[in-house]
Image (spheres, coloured by chain):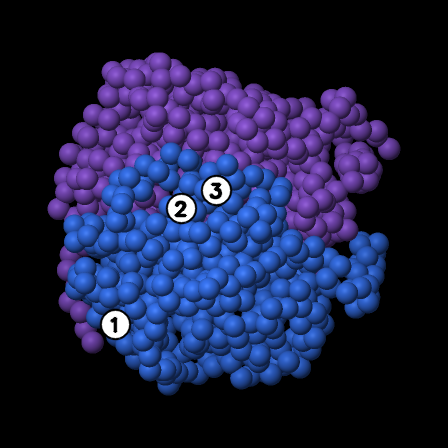
Chain colours: A blue, B purple
């Protein structure tokens, strides 16, 4: 016991002296911008003969009109459903034959098209990726097919109370702000998408000056740049449409959305308010504050609600890091009869976070966790590529990865209290609860006005 | 101090030369006098070490009345010891910049820590300590029991697909403990006693019933010194009783119509297949690739793409210690008939039995298997888990060396042979999800 505690102390002392880079061991990273404005970043990792490529379009479901939510995601998924020279089936045959994967999807901030292959199939993978990116045709029958599949998927996701709860929460928090609809859209919004909408979305946002590419794995940068130039060099630049900046409105007071699921024997709960953006200067103190409050297994919420009270299998707080402020929420589930008890126990911990500085042992654990965890989290070429995507998408400094641990160590306990006081607002929150309304409605009235809907109304 | 024995003289390497790519991951195997096997995989490419403690016990080692004990016990393993009480246990891992967790399956229970290289001793100490000195009592059992009940409600009782999956095992097996899932039956979770948990712990968590895998930025000599230091003094126990029940042959299709609130009808089916040591796994995996993997696979292309009758169709050959299941699952799109979807799945399986797949399909399946295998080795954690499952499922982790070569040897005739032998109507269990729509509730604003 003593020996181990001593080694922690030693590590802390040493951590202040040794430059953080000494532990980082980042693989070689090179980047180059093609003539058409496409930035290409290459991360070398020669451990396994694997290559991962991704093209990121810096426009995601944020650009969907609310009545056509799901358009960005549908467009990304449709890229591989037929090009000027290949049918959807031929694309599928080609990528499956080399044992690779090729897929596109959109989240709020970006549309990402990824392709993974073994090194020996790199040429096939890159050529297919370029073909689907540059030459998609969006045939009417393929759009119809993709829409039907998306609609069926949305319908089926209503059987997952966790998903219903997440969507209900976004709906009540964001309203008609674009974050209020899920990236895959709703039944009515997907229904209203026409193939011309898909072509217009593609024409408006899929251009090299609105994109970047990250290639990671067992590759030589010089060869990759040459191959990418050949495959993507002819992608034409364009002018991006102007988008009027908008912000979501913070909730006032308490509001409860109760989604009735009469067969539920367990209640899903998500509540919260707006959070901070990925580029916010409070990112590091908030990361540590959130670790202590609810993102770790040793968090106050897990200790109180799971370990001590046995009320749930999982409780956590999450800040959704987007370009614009997303949600800061607490998510959990419990037996129906424990719904209000679990919510109140969680709110008590959130309030406490704002009133006093965190304990030394909590603070040190959080700092040490991220200092050790972050370098380890960049193990595979895909992990490093994922961080580079964040740097590009959120406009973070290039030194972000190497400085991460240094920035974590700059945070003080006072900073943590300050961000808790500035960003946690338990008096002004929305709650989404998915449960058998007969079991929980009366108790939820104690939180605030309750709006009750059925799952079919989602 | 007990000296470890290096069981194999030289380092061995994953060799996948046959697939055109040389993968060099050294694996060393050691054994302690108390029976603990230690597998070391040295790799300095990233400053991280994974420590995995594998116990050769899972729901396979349970009996009615204590179903779910392996999983509930997994939760109790985080309740601390005298040396490291509960509140210290996880904090110690996290304060050293690491993380930890565990999982329980049919044949194994596995705990792991991932730490920076200079902190590996913390994990070895904690794992050795809790393998023998766990401190559990009525109070922490009561609260953890409720945590597990909530886990069961979330994963199974409130999830139509969770219910289907559980029904498949409940119905496919009659005698063998694969009849229940690792989560166990609700009333068993509610009622099993502290004494039952302690008895389970004593025999199943002995060093002679477990193995360690330590992978990553390590120096094997140093690691073995630490392992000897912490595990050496622990004594072996009488081994747990062997699982002797053999599932009797199934002589006819079993079919269940399972009613539950759900948006779309669906079905899951399972066919009995041999245990993980069987060489027939290679052609069975090829068959699964041909049917399910990728948008050009036979069933995706037919049911999801061309006819648009299914939202998804999936399946695989599950490798387990004892004979397990080759499963297939599909959900019907709104307006489509699940009976038709099911019939078309059987048509495609019949086709595998009556005509050889094309050479091109065979090559595609092999390319997919090769790619899956290599992509699955990218992190220390995944690599260690892969090696651990070879040890559990096939009885010897060294079989990982035959994997790449094994599927390259498969012929179209092999695929036809295993489809005929195992994917038969006679040995099939089918669960149909019949959606019950809830009575409409009037909305109030």
* Residue labelled with disc 2: A127
Subunit of label 3: A
Q: Nearer the viewer, residue A419 or A204?
A: A204
Residue at (29% x, 27% y) in the render: B429
| Nearest the eye: A33 or B387 | A33
The residue tagged 1 is A66
Q: Which residue is mark 3?
A: A122
Asked if the residues shown at circle 2 and circle 3 are in contact, with their CB atoms under 8 angstroms apart, the answer is no
Percent coordinates x, y for residue A339 in the rendering: 39, 65
Check if mark 2 and mark 3 are on a common chain.
yes
Q: Residues within 10 Å of mark 3 (few under 14, many from 20)?
A: many
* SS of the residue under disc 2: helix
Q: CA distance from mark 2 to mark 3?
A: 8 Å
Callout 1: chain = A
On screen, residue B167 above or below A145: above
Would residue B188 be found to the left or right of residue B435 on screen? Answer: right
């Amino acid at each position: 016991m003593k020996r181990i505690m001593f080694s922690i102390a030693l590590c802390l002392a040493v951590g202040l002296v040794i430059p953080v880079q000494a532990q980082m061991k980042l693989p070689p990273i090179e980047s180059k911008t093609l003539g058409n404005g496409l930035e290409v970043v290459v991360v070398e990792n020669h451990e396994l003969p694997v290559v991962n490529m991704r093209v990121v379009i810096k426009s995601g479901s944020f650009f969907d009109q609310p009545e056509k939510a799901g358009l960005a995601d549908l467009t990304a998924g449709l890229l591989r459903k037929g090009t000027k020279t290949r049918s959807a089936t031929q694309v599928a045959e080609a990528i499956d034959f080399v044992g690779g994967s090729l897929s596109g999807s959109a989240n709020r901030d970006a549309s990402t098209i990824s392709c993974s292959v073994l090194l020996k199939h790199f040429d096939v993978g890159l050529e297919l990726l370029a073909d689907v990116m540059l030459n998609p045709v969006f045939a009417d029958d393929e759009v119809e097919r993709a829409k039907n599949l998306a609609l069926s998927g949305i319908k089926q996701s209503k059987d997952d109370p966790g998903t219903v709860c997440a969507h209900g929460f976004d709906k009540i928090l964001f309203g008609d702000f674009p974050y209020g609809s899920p990236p895959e859209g709703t039944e009515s919004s997907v229904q209203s998408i026409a193939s011309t909408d898909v072509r217009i979305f593609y024409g408006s946002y899929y251009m090299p000056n609105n994109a970047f590419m990250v290639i990671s794995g067992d590759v030589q940068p010089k060869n990759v740049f040459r191959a990418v130039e050949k495959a993507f060099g002819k992608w034409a630049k364009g002018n991006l449409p102007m988008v009027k900046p908008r912000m979501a409105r913070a909730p006032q007071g308490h509001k409860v959305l109760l989604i009735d699921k009469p067969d539920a024997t367990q209640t899903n709960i998500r509540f919260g308010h707006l959070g901070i953006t990925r580029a916010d200067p409070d990112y590091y103190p908030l990361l540590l504050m959130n670790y202590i409050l609810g993102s770790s297994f040793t968090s106050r919420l897990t200790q109180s609600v799971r370990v001590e009270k046995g009320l749930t299998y999982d409780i956590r707080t999450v800040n959704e890091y987007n370009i614009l402020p997303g949600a800061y929420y607490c998510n959990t589930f419990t037996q129906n009869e424990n719904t209000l008890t679990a919510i109140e126990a969680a709110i008590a911990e959130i309030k406490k976070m704002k009133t006093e500085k965190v304990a030394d042992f909590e603070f040190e654990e959080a700092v040490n966790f991220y200092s050790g965890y972050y370098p380890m989290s960049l193990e595979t070429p895909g992990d490093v590529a994922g961080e580079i995507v964040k740097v590009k998408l959120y406009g973070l400094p290039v030194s972000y990865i190497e400085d991460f641990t240094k920035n974590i160590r700059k945070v003080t306990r006072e900073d943590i209290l300050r961000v808790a006081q500035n960003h946690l607002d338990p008096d002004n929150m929305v709650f989404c609860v998915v449960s058998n309304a007969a079991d929980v409605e009366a108790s939820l009235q104690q939180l605030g006005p309750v709006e009750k809907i059925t799952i079919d109304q989602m | 101090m007990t000296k470890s024995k290096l069981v194999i003289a030289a380092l061995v390497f994953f060799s996948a030369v046959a697939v055109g790519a040389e993968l060099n991951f050294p694996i060393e195997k050691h054994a302690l006098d108390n029976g603990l096997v230690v597998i070391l995989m040295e790799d300095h490419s990233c400053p991280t070490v994974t420590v995995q403690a594998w116990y050769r016990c899972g729901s396979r080692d349970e009996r009615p009345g204590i179903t779910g004990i392996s999983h509930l016990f997994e939760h109790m393993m985080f309740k601390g010891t005298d040396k490291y009480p509960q509140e210290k246990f996880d904090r110690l891992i996290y304060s050293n910049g690491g993380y930890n967790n565990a999982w329980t399956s049919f044949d194994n229970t596995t705990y792991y820590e991932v730490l920076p290289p200079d902190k590996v001793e913390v994990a070895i100490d904690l794992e050795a300590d809790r393998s023998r000195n766990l401190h559990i009592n009525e109070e922490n059992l009561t609260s953890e029991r409720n945590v597990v009940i909530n886990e069961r409600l979330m994963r199974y009782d409130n999830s139509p697909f969770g219910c289907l999956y559980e029904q498949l095992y409940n119905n496919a097996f009659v005698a063998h403990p694969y009849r229940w899932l690792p989560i166990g039956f609700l009333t068993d979770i509610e009622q099993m006693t502290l004494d039952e948990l302690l008895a389970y712990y004593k025999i199943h968590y002995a060093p002679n019933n477990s193995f360690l895998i330590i992978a990553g930025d390590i120096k094997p000599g140093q690691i073995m010194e630490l392992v000897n230091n912490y595990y050496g003094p622990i004594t072996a126990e009488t081994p747990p009783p062997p699982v002797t029940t053999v599932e009797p042959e199934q002589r006819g299709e079993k079919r269940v119509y399972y009613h539950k609130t759900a948006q779309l009808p669906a079905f899951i089916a399972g066919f009995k297949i041999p245990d993980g040591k069987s060489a027939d796994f290679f052609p069975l995996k090829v068959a699964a690739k041909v049917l399910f993997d990728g948008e050009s696979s036979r069933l995706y292309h037919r049911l999801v793409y061309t006819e648009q009758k299914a939202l998804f169709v999936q399946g695989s050959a599950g490798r387990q210690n004892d004979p397990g299941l080759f499963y297939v699952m599909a959900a019907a799109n709104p307006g489509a008939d699940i009976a038709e979807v099911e019939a078309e799945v059987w048509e495609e399986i019949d086709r595998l039995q009556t005509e050889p797949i094309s050479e091109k399909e065979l090559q595609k399946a092999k390319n997919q298997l090769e790619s899956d295998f290599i992509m699955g080795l990218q992190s220390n954690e995944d690599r260690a888990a892969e090696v651990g499952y070879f040890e559990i499922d096939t009885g010897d982790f060294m079989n990982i060396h035959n994997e790449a070569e094994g599927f390259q040897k498969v012929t179209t005739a092999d695929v036809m042979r295993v489809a005929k032998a195992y994917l038969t109507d006679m040995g099939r269990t089918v669960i149909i999800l019949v959606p019950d729509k809830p009575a409409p509730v009037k909305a109030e604003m």
